[in-house]
Image (cartoon, helix red, strand yellow):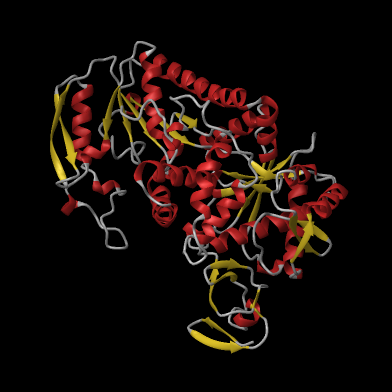
């Protein structure tokens, strides 16, 4: 039966199955194309087409291709470790500076320079050999037997929660593994990576889409690194380092205990933060809160306000949104639309003057931005006392330009974000970004009437703003608040899955939806009725006591 394939602006007719590699032909001698979309579905280059199709090939400047590249790189690195140190257990985790941390979790083993040299040499050998990576479909029982033979208890545990009766593996020169992702056709497609020693383990860098397919310069980021380590240590205490671990804790402890255990961590951090501010309250005039989208900033700011009130401190919240310039003064983005995420969209001089006057004890008439008419109007009059620090929250709250006239000693800066250190198994970490995207999908549907498709479509723009305006300021903060709640994905599952599953294969957001479904499906279901009304999770699923505050 004949069928048509359209690729590179040309249409060809075939009467037999044809692989994407064959369609690609000799157009990519340097192997920079790593994946393709066939009728909008992400497919590996070894996939065979046998029906009318429109094919779009992509390299690592596209997000789906970059994720395939990153998963394939992890496969190669795991293969190198298995060859050089077969008895060593390693775990990958997303790390500082947009990299992957490689933890050596076999007791008593620490990374060394000699180990780095050996592993890198083996990685390079595997890449240069251009070994084929072959996809296999086996039963869950067969997969379990293969994992038992290799001592991979982590992968065996995850299979218990796999809803399907079969599983996939990739074989490469006798090595078997699965990264819950599509893969490149062969190891020769891995062109760029950097492996460096960062005791007690290693750091693996890879090309990033937001860096136009290049590797960003490595920044150690000690403040953020310390927050990740604390998250990792906490995850071990409550058994949330892996998805099977979270499922087991829910099943064994019960919903109520596990929810309260996770919430206790947030309560403890708030108490710790309140004490830090109280100890220096004579100098602190402004508390600045910033973080990426769906970090839980609104609930956190309200809970911090209550924590400080319990200590005799009377904080006052101000909105940075009231300092937007008029619509005709806002700069345009690359698409010619008003760039409301730019710091240049705010009246920085007025904000600084108002803040300076307030902390000097003067009465100030604050502006209020009227979004109906598109400009500021006169707002309330305000005068603050010495025990009334001002809380400002927003994308630019940690940017010193916003408070350039305020002495550094008068500012206390807080960065908030979910610092997840959760893996499907040792070789497959969960994406921090995907966790926030799921929060955003659920919240936007619950409170803004937005579909999952709409939220996913606008997510790249949100991410660009985060890289441009937020992440560069996080290292200058005084405290990192980890807004992760390990029980949240089992709770979010019932909200997010129906929204994602209704996205059809013809929709451009379908590949992202499928990726999120592949992550959520391994979690057990968990009811939300025991989640406290002041929980950060209520900001996304509803029922928050701060909804009208």
Q: Residue furthest top?
A: 312
- Tell me if residue 96 comes above or below residue 65 in the rendering: above
- Tell me if residue 148 comes above or below residue 281 in the rendering: below
Viewer-nearest residue: 452 or 237: 452
User: From where the camera sits, is residue 118 visible?
Assistant: no
Q: Position of residue 125 (x, y in %)?
A: 76, 64
Which residue sits at x=82%, y=65%? 173
Q: Position of residue 216 (x, y in %)?
A: 52, 54
- Tell me if residue 359 comes above or below residue 211 in the rendering: above
Viewed as shown, does residue 314 lie left or right of 380? right
Which quadrant of the figure has residue 286? top left
Number of marks in the image? 0
Which residue sits at x=21%, y=39%? 323
Viewed as shown, does residue 534 lie left or right of 492? left
- Tell me if residue 3 comes above or below residue 539 in the rendering: below
Which quadrant of the figure has residue 222? top right
Which residue sits at x=18%, y=20%? 383
Task: Classify the position of the N terminus by image quarter.
Answer: bottom right
Viewer-nearest residue: 540 or 460: 540
Q: Position of residue 525 (x, y in %)?
A: 61, 38
Viewed as shown, does residue 5 lie left or right of 453? right
User: From where the camera sits, is residue 176 visible?
Assistant: yes
Q: Position of residue 44 (x, y in %)?
A: 64, 68
């Amino acid at each position: 039966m004949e069928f048509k394939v359209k690729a590179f602006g040309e249409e060809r007719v075939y009467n037999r199955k044809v692989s994407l590699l064959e369609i690609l032909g000799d157009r990519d001698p340097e192997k920079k194309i790593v994946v393709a979309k066939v009728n909008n579905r992400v497919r590996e280059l070894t996939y065979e087409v046998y029906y009318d199709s429109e094919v779009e090939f992509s390299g690592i400047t596209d997000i789906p291709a970059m994720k395939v590249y990153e998963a394939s790189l992890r496969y190669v690195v795991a293969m190198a470790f298995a060859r050089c140190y077969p008895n060593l257990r390693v775990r990958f985790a997303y790390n500082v500076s947009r990299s992957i941390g490689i933890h050596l979790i076999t007791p008593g083993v620490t990374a060394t320079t000699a180990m780095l040299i050996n592993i890198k040499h083996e990685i390079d050998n595997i890449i240069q050999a251009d070994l084929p990576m072959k996809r296999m479909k086996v039963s869950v029982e067969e997969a379990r037997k293969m994992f038992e033979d290799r001592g991979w208890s982590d992968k065996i545990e995850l299979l218990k929660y796999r809803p399907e009766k079969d599983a996939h593996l990739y074989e490469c020169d006798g090595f078997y593994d699965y990264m819950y992702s599509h893969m490149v056709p062969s190891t020769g497609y891995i062109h760029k990576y950097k492996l460096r020693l960062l005791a007690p383990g290693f750091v693996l860098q890879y090309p990033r889409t937001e860096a136009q397919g290049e590797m960003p310069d490595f920044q150690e980021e000690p403040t953020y690194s310390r927050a990740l380590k604390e998250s990792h240590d906490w995850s071990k205490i409550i058994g949330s380092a892996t998805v099977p671990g979270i499922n087991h804790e829910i099943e064994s402890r019960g919903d109520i205990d596990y929810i309260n255990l996770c919430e206790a961590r947030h309560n403890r951090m708030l108490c710790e933060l309140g004490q830090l501010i109280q100890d220096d309250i004579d100098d602190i005039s402004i508390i600045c809160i910033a973080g990426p989208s769906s970090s839980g900033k609104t609930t956190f700011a309200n809970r911090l306000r209550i924590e400080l009130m319990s200590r005799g401190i009377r904080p006052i919240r101000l909105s940075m949104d009231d300092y937007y310039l008029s619509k005709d003064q806002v700069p345009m983005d690359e698409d010619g639309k008003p760039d409301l995420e730019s710091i240049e969209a705010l009246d920085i001089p007025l904000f600084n003057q108002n803040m300076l006057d307030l902390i000097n004890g003067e009465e100030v008439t604050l502006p209020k931005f009227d979004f109906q008419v598109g400009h500021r109007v006169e707002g309330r009059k305000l005068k603050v006392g010495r025990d009334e620090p001002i809380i400002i929250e927003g994308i630019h709250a940690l940017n010193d330009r916003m408070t350039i006239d305020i002495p550094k000693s008068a500012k206390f800066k807080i960065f908030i974000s979910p610092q997840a250190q959760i893996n499907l198994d040792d070789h497959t970490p969960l994406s921090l970004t995907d966790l926030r995207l799921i929060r955003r999908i659920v919240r936007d549907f619950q409170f803004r009437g937005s579909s999952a498709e709409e939220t996913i479509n606008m997510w790249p723009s949100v991410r660009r703003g985060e890289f441009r305006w937020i992440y560069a300021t996080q290292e200058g903060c005084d405290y990192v608040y980890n807004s992760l709640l390990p029980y949240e994905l089992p709770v979010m599952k019932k909200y997010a899955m129906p929204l994602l599953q209704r996205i059809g294969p013809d929709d451009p957001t379908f590949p992202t939806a499928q990726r999120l479904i592949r992550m959520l499906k391994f979690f057990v279901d968990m009811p939300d009725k025991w989640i406290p009304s002041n929980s950060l999770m209520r900001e996304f699923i509803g029922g928050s006591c701060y909804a009208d505050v």
